[in-house]
Image (spheres, helix red, strand yellow):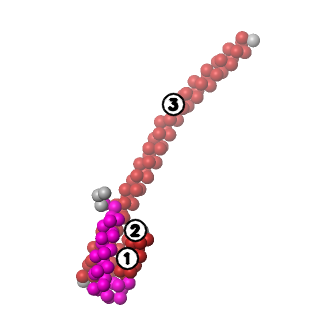
Amino acid sequence: MSKGRDFMNIDISLVIALSATVIATLTPMATTYMNNRHERKMYELRFYKQHQAEAIENYIRDTGSVISSPKEDNLTSYGKSVGEILLYVPQPLCDEISALHKLITSYDWSNAQDRYLKLCQGLAEYHPRRSK
């Protein structure tokens, strides 16, 4: 009977030792995986925020240029940036951008200038590089 108990004790000791070894091996790998995944997500978030800021800045620059000087080159740059900014701003600002776009495409420059200044204030509040 004591031989059976010794066998059980050795078996349990072996299982505990092997479990500790497996856990000691897997823990650093799991930690590395989770850290790398977190770093990748943070990189993607920084990239998104940087691109968002650039899209807003380009839109403000190009819209100001087209309103002050509606030349073909300015209209082309404006057309590129208006489509891009809509990807990065919330719906209320999208509505404001669309309303300004209608004024620009109908060559209503005086009303476009007024709406542009109001929109710039809204974009400044939303801008990702703005210190809070």
Q: Which mark is residue 2?
A: none
Please state which amino acid type lies under the numbered disc 3: Ala
Element marked by disc 2: loop
Relative to the observer, which residue lies in front, 128 or 76? Answer: 128
Q: How many numbered marks does the figure carry?
A: 3
Q: Where does label 2 land, which residue?
A: 89
| 32 displayed left or right of 105 | right
Element marked by disc 3: helix
Q: Is residue 103 above or below residue 86?
A: below
Tell which circle, 3 or 1, labels the residue nearer the N-terminal end.
Answer: 3
Q: Does residue 128 appear in this view?
A: yes
Please state which amino acid type lies under the numbered disc 1: Ile
Q: Which residues are magenta?
A: 102-129
Gap in Å between the C-alphas at discs 1 and 2? 10 Å
Quadrant in the picture for the N terminus: top right
Q: Where does label 3 land, which residue?
A: 24
Q: Residue at x 72, y 11 (%)?
A: 2
Q: Where does label 1 land, which residue?
A: 97
The spot of residue 53 in percent (x, y) is 33, 64
Please state which amino acid type lies under the numbered disc 2: Val
Disc number lying in front (3 or 1) = 1
Q: Residue furthest right?
A: 1
The spot of residue 58 in percent (x, y) is 31, 71
Tell which circle, 2 or 3, labels the residue nearer the N-terminal end.
Answer: 3
Question: Crowding near pointer 1: few (<14 within 10 Å), some, many (20+)?
Answer: many
Quarter location, residue 69: bottom left
